[in-house]
Structure formats: structure tokens, C-alpha cells
Image (cartoon, rainbow, N blue to C red):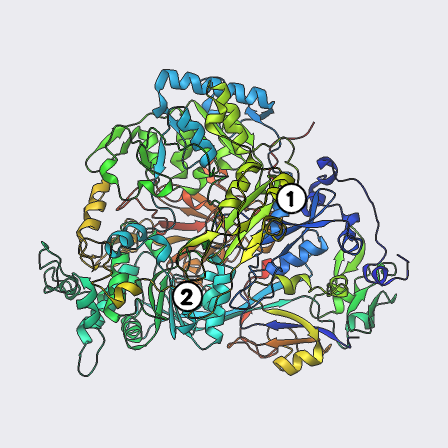
Amino acid sequence: MSEDGFLSKVLGKANLNRRSFLKWSAAIGGSNVLVGGIPEGFKHAVPLAYAEEKGRWIPASCWSDCGSKGFNKAYVVNGLPVRQGTDDTIKDKPNRPQLRACAKGRSQRNHLLSASRLKYPMKRKHWEPGGGNKELRGKDEWVRISWDEALDLMAKEMLRIKEKHGNKAFLCVRPGEPTERLMSEFGGYVNGWGEHSGGTYSAAWHMGWGIPFSELENDRLDLENTELFVLWASNPAWSRLGMPMYDMSRYKKNGAKVIVVDPYYSATAQAVADEWIPCRPATDTAMLLGMAYVLINEDDPQNDPLIDWDFLNKYTVGFDKDHMPKGADPKDNFMDYVLGTYDGQPKTPQWASEICGTPPEQIRYLARRIATTNKVSFRMSPAPARVHNADSLPQVVMTLGAMTGHMGKRGEMFGHDWGHSFLAEGYPLLTGGWMLTPTSYVNGKKFENPLASGFKGYFGAFWRTDRFEDEDVWLINYNELWHALNVGEYTAGKNKKRKVDVKMIYHVYNNKMNQFPGTMECIDVHRKVDFVVTQNLFLNPTAQYSDLVLPVQSHWERYGYVRMGYRNQLLWTSQVMKPYFESQSDSWISREVGKRLGLDPDEIIHCSFKQNVFDHVANCKVIKDDASGYEPLVTITNQDMKEFGFEGKPQKGRISVKEFKEKGIYHIERKKGDQFEHIPYKAFIDNPEKNPRNTPSGKFEIHCQSYADYITGCGWDEKSPLAEYVPPLEGYESTFKDWKNKIKGEYPLQQYDLHVLRRVHSTLDNTPWLQEAFLQSFWMNPIDAEKRGILDRDTILIRSKYGKVLRNVTITQLIMPGVVAIGQGAWVNIDEETGIDRGGCSNVLHGSVSTGQGHMGLNSCNVQIEKWKGEPLKYDHQLPPLVPIKEA
Amino acid sequence: MAKQLAFYFDASTCIDCKTCQIACKDKNNNPLGLNYRRVVNYGAGSWIPDAVHKELFIPTNFFAYNVSSACMHCEEPICVEVCPTGAMHKRDDGIVLVDDSKCVGCRLCQQACPYGAPQYNEAKGVMTKCDLCADLLEIGQETACVASCPQRALEVGELADLRKKYGSINAIEPLPKAIYTKPSIVITPHPRSQYSGKGTGKILNPMEV
């Protein structure tokens, strides 16, 4: 390549320093250099490498639990990922779009090649068997130890605890399959239960409407038929970034109108909303009831038809006293509740407005607009359902859908947009792989936690509260978990409290200290128990308060990961780089701990990780062309098995295993109205007698006794079969000490959580590129700020009943007065002197409290805010990375 | 041979997700504090007490949209004009580039450019900027930002072709007016975009830019 060549002219005189990158320490040097994962002097190696073909592209995983999925790949030169890319395996078009990654996925190499990753097993300096000085958890020093020492001491302590206290002394909350297998083989463990993402929707839809998770939405091509979208607290620009937001923009460009209902003028509202209607958090049920009142009150079948009575009479029970389910009190009908016939309080728009902050005229307008527009898709995110006592919310949503008849038809839907790509749009067209666990074993031995007997997997505990009092069921609801462990007693079903005494907490694949409500109580619990172990990539909050920390490999360092994308993509990403320093896989750790516990490791993990990946690949299915069933996706020959080195049976599919591994993604093309169209309930709407709902009445249950019984059975609240407005714990009303005269109380502001683009829950929070791109924010309206003498970027103190947090405020018009918002997932960082969190963790402000169906109530929180008079807080991108252990 | 390569940007679909910013940063291995491409969120709005329901505040005159910009590879690049060493130069295909070997890091281009495109790299002691991923274009690939955008809001092409396809708007707030340097860009405005010089809003994310 000559000096005068094109590349030289473009690139300038680059310092071509061809060092070897096989040693991590060479690649990860000082603070600035490690950020890009590649020394400055090698800047132009990438384009040169293209020209000289020195590296190769490897499909790379982005495994975070965000509301979306994108495809990433890494360009690897000498074992080091030096650049990333996204899906270019196909030509991009709406019927088969490229699965483009987002800023988070594209920052993975900056995330993983980091000085703040865990490199070695570490022990807390002042730990001893039994705990030693437990008060020092969270502030102790770390000592590097060998794997043997770590595993030996862990097993020894586990055996001691088991002998003295039994298996009910072990707490592992959703640790992922490798650890579930270990702990089940060891005799069992206490786990948690509850709904994280879906709020009150999951039980409500299951019981009232008889619909499984994966069938809530119309497919993305069918939504091209929609004329009016009502996006209620739905912000796909942040929460479903990628294909769903791209689709929303497409629908808008094709002529659909969009109304956004949200306390915040969100990025989605900014981009696509024709109208934005603010509504206070935790008050949505009231506003929806106000809308229902308008329709009931103003409906005139002759001159002003607003209600689809045919739909109600044919497909639902419980709307009015003449259409009740068998055995129900005719007074318990929705219409009379809304009209206030028996409780004396008509749920008028004026009544609703006092609660939700939306003018009554606008409530009336929205109701009538929905009722009189032909093809309406009402899509609510689960956020309003993540509110204490919001059990009636989904019932009102469903009822409004039935009243307006916008269900089970092309271009029409009333429901919520589910939070995972593999559950969006309807039944999958491609299946395979694993989700939400480090790995799952296709052909492994069937196992069960002896302390959760009869429950299978994550969804097993749902809707079975009748079993919670059984002696072999030890499941604690996520929301009361930390409080329960603090006081030694949890709710085990209706009217039943059970004593619990956990001695060891084993954190795997989670950050529950940060992400469950009640972080302050959680810290107290962590300073009480005998032994805390965390297995993770980083020294995250749970790790910081542990005795023993074990470094794990990411999906970039393991053989592969098979994972569903949306309905019509399947991903198989591969190993990008060698395991980071001494990190190991969760499966290896489970086997090694198991050995030392006297168990047979082959009973825990039966095969190699690589073999398991191939088992998954062989198991991948694609829908048949006539939609009648599924068939194998991947063609595997005996030659393939020999070359790759795995066992199995040859099979015929649509793509060779070689090509699938190389490309990393398989797409299915669709056409609007094709055989894969998915319209929820369409079969029921077309023929309700032949295709009844999976409910006791066979219809949509606006009055739902089984739902009421379930919630009452959970043990916290009594629920009527009707949708009723219950002022939530820490909603709007609770900001007043005198509601009638509107005198504010001790915590006068409403706080709620936003999912922000700089991280996925608490993952990726420590990624410099993302810290720079997305400010760590706390949003407050100027009206509220002015009252308190607060200016933009001031450090403020946020106080709730449960804890205190410092933030630098962003004063913005974009949020409703009286409402403040925080990006959820920031890592807690308690200042030991003051007890104040400097990290911005929203769960410091939330209490460990369960209501209703034991769902997360994270959007119901009351706070007071004042200007901080102490040392101003630095923004986190100004702080050095959190390095777990200083190299000698 | 191209005459004037240019970006196309669709402000009606950009959501400030900063994927373009990260993709560019990744491809160029830029350090913290240096991003060739940045996204600005621009808008306004206020809360006025309702005339009838005096306890309620009504959102009034709200609008907001985003502008993603890197370098405009201007037809009359002022950065080239002011450069004392000739390091900053414009190629025949319209791309404006820094010749590292000539740049002395005086930063006059940075002061002159109304778009903030040339940025000083402290470690290297020279100016750096978006080079339209000339090396990728050379081997038939798209620029990092264009290929990355999940909203498909960016394109690269011949300026004349982009104008035929999308029109000739080349300045919306908060970008400066086009008369200064004749930026080679075509923009599809957001429904509430404001023409440069006629803005009533402000940059809402100043610390991120």
C-alpha cells in the first residue's frame, strides 16, 4: 500500500502499531484507552483490516432484558472485537426488515472490555464462616482468591447452613437454570414469585379474557390497517426501540393518526403524536372510568351510537344487570358501578379529572373519538398496571374495548404491548433457544425445586395461590421479599403468615437489591444473614454487599446463544472472544460447587455447553407454510456433526447449520393478510359458540369471580369481581393530608419510573459510551422547581417514606406539574455517613410492600424534594469507573 | 465519480435514540468527549392554568423534534477557507477531510464551522471529523450511521439525486441557516419543524451534545 494510495489520503498518517492483542492487559490499559477497547494508535486498523481481510465478523449477542431485540455482530481481529455492526444479511424492506440494533447493543464491546468487570473470585476481607463482621458488607475491602479456595469455602458454608438450618435457609431469586439445577439437586431453596413487567395485566387477561401472554397483540402487518392509535403510557421509542418503533413511524407515515396519553411528552409523543393528553401516573383507572361514563351517559343507539351493544351482549358477561354470569349478584354490574347507582358516586369526567389531572372536556373528547372512529388500536404499556392496587385497571381497559367493539378485527385491538420481543405480535413463526437465563438444557434431566413442588418455571407460580400454604411451597412475593426477610415472616396465601429465616442469599443473574422495591431494607437484610454470594459480570450492588464474588463469562465469551427475536427472526450468536481473565460460566460453577457439596455434577449439568447449544439449534422450529404446525428449521448432516464436534441425529430443514452459524440470524418474510396473520380473539368473535373463551362463562368476563378470588387469595387485599377504582397506596390522593380541601401532605409529589435508553434495567449502567450519550436524569417541572428555589442541574434531595436519593435535576416542561420521574436501574450507592443514595436508585424510594395480586407497584410513589445544601453531585460520566480490585 | 456526496436526514422519524452517534463512535474509536455525529433534541412548551378548571395546568404550544448531524461536507466549506496549512481540504467527490500530516491543531476550523463538525483530538494533537466513512464507501458499504439507524432516518447519496427524491430543505432549527456554508444535506422536516432563524424553542438536551 503506497503512501499516495487512496487509503493513506483518507486516513492520514496512521501509527501502525501492530501489537499482539492476545494478552488482555495489553488491550486494557489505562482509563481512556480501555474505553474503546483498543489503543489510540491503532485507530485505523479497522478499515485497513477490511482491505486486507485480517479479521472476521462474528454474530454477537445482546442479551439484555429490554423490551426489544436487535441483531449485533462484532469484527474480531486477533481475538479482540474492534468494531460492531448490525443486520445486513438481507435487503431491508417493511415485510422483512433488518433487525437493526440500538445504541445499547452497539455499546456491548465498550461494556464488556472494561476495567470494572470482575476478573477473579474475591472474598470480603473481614468475612468468616457465619458471616464475621456483617456490618462491613458494602464497605469492606476485597481480597483476590483462587477458584479452588472460593468454591471450597462456599461449599463448606453451604453444608454448614444446611446441616444447622435446612434448605429453607437458602434464598435464590430467579437465578437462572444452571443454579436452579444445582440448588434443586442440593435439596431446594426459597424462591420469589410475582409479576415483574406486566403489572396487574397478567392475571387479569388470563382469567377475565382467557388469553395467554403471547396472543395479546395484532401482528405488525395487520396494524397497517389501523386508522387511529391510542398509545397509553406507551413509549416504544424508549421501551421497544428497533422494529416496533420503526413500525409505529411507518403507520404514521401511511396516514394513521396517533394520540398519546402520558404524564410525559415522551420521545414517541414528540415523533408521532398528533395529540398529547397528559394523565397523572397511578390514576389511569379513574380516567378510563370517566371515559366509560361518557359513553354510557351519552350513547343513543338511534342518533348518537357510542356503544356496540351487539358486541357486549354477544361476547361478554357482567356489563349490565341483564347480562350477568351465573350466580352473580345483578347489582354487581359495570354499568351501574360507573353510573354510581349503588355507591352514590357517578364516575363522571369531572370526578375522574379531579384525580387524573386531565380536563373533563378532554376525557369526554377521547372517549367519543375512540367510540366513533372505525379502526382503533388502543395500546397501553404495562406501566400503568405497575401501580399499587391497580388490579381493576386491565378490567376497565378490556371493558372499554368491548364497549367500542374494537377487538378481534383487522386493524383493531385493545390491549397492552408486551415487554418481550418473543411475546409480541402473536404466536411465533420461529421457535428455539432460551430466554431470561444464562442457559437452559434441552435434553437435561427434568428437575424441580423441592421447595416449589409442582411449579414449573417462571410462570408456574402464577394463579396458584391456593398452593402457597403447602409445606413444600416456599415462595415469597417479590414486593414484600426484603421486608419479609427483615421481620422473619412472609405472606403464604390468604390469612396465612409463615415464619422464614434465611441464612444464605445466592445472587445469580440478577441485581435484586437494586431492582426490587425496598432497597434500604434489602441492605439491612444483607447485613443480617450468614452468607452472601454473588455471581456476576460486574461488581454490581448485590456483589458489593456480598462475602464472596464469582466472575462469570458473558455470552460473548461462551460458545453460542440461540434466542428468538420477534415473531419472524431467530438468532444464533457465537463466541466473540476468550473468557475474560478467570471468569467461568454459570454451568461450570454449578458443577464445581455441586461436586464439593457431595453431589454428582452430571446430575446437575449433563453435557458440555457447546453440545447444549447444538441441541438447541437442532430443536429450532419454523412454522409450516400452511400454518398448520412447526417443522425443523436447521438442516444437520452427519458431516456437520463430525466437523463441528457434536452429537445428534441428522435432520432436514430450511437452512444449513453452517450458514445459520455464520449469518447468525434467520428471517421469515411475510405479506399483509397472509396465512400468518394474527388477530387476537378473532376465532371467538367470528364464532363464539364454536370457539369459546377459556373462562368459566366462555365469554369475556367484565364481572370476573375467578379474578377476584385469585387476588383475595394472594393475601393482601379483598377484590370485588367488578372493576372498581381503589385509590392506590402512594398514588395521587395520598399526596394530600386533606383531600377535600386539597392540602398537601408530607410527600406532595408523585414519582414514577421511566425505562431509559442509557441502560436496560440495571444492565449497561456502567458503560462509558452510554453514560456520555444519555445524561443520568431526574425530571421535574419548572412550576414545582420554582416553588422550591431549584434551578436546572442543581443537586436535589428526593425523600420518600422509605429512603433518600440525591440527583442532579433536569428541569423540563416535558413532564406534568406535580409529577417527577427517574430513569430506573441506576446502581444504588449509599453514602455510609448520611445513609443517602448518591447513585439514583429508584427502589431506595420504594417500600417493600405487596398489594393486590403481588405485582410491582413501582409507579406509585410519593416524594418530597428540596435543594441539596451539601456537596454537589458529580454526573456519573464524570466519575472514574468502579474498579473492583486494584492490580498490584 | 460522485460530484457531491451528501447526507439525507428524516427529522419526521428521528427519535434521538443516538444509535447513529454510538455506531460512529465505535467505528472511529473516538474517546469520551468526542463524537463526530450528535443528536440534538429541540423544542418548547409551557403549562398554562386552565381558564375554567383553575387547579389544572394545560400543556400549551408543545413541540419537539430531533436533529442528527455530523459534518455537512459543505459546498462552501468555511473550515477549508480558514485552514492555514491546507490540512482541511475538499475532495472531488465533495467529502471534506483533514490531512493529519499537515494539521497543526490550531483549531481555527473548529471556531469557524457553524455545525461544530471539526473537533480537536487531544491525544493526537490534530483535528478530526466525520469523513463520510470514505473507507466504507470505497468498498461498497454504507456509512456506519446510515446502516445503524433503527428508524431508517439517514441516507447517503449524490446531493442532486437526494434533492430530486426528497426536496431541497437543508436547514431547520437548531441548525444554522444554509447561506453561510451551503451544507450538502437534504432534510425531511418534522411536522412541527421550524426554519432556521425562525425558532421559538431551545435545545432540550444540552449536556448530551
Label 1 neighbourhood size at 10 Å, few (<14), some (14-19), many (20+)? Answer: many
Left or right of B174, for residue A24 = right
Give the vertical position of B107 relative to A794 (above or below).
below
Residue at mark 1 to residue at mark 2: CA–CA distance: 38 Å
Q: Residue under label 1, please give it.
A: A576
Image coords of residue A398 (percent x, y): 27, 61
Image location (x, y in percent) of residue A389: 26, 50
Q: Amino acid at mark 1?
A: Val
**Residue B81, percent across and down?**
82, 73
Query: Which quadrant would residue A446 be assigned to in this image?
Result: top left
Kindly check if marks 1 and 2 are in contact, taking CB atoms under 8 A apart as contact: no
Q: Secondary structure at mark 2?
A: loop
Residue A321: which quarter of the image?
bottom left
Q: Residue at x 70, y 27 (%)?
A: A888
Q: Amino acid at mark 2?
A: Gln
- Do marks 1 and 2 both belong to one polypeptide chain? yes
Residue A137 horizontal side relative to residue A330, left or right: right
Visible in this render: residue B1? yes
> Which residue is identified by label 2?
A675
Above or below for A706 versus A277? above
Q: Is residue A839 rendered to the left or right of residue A353? A: right
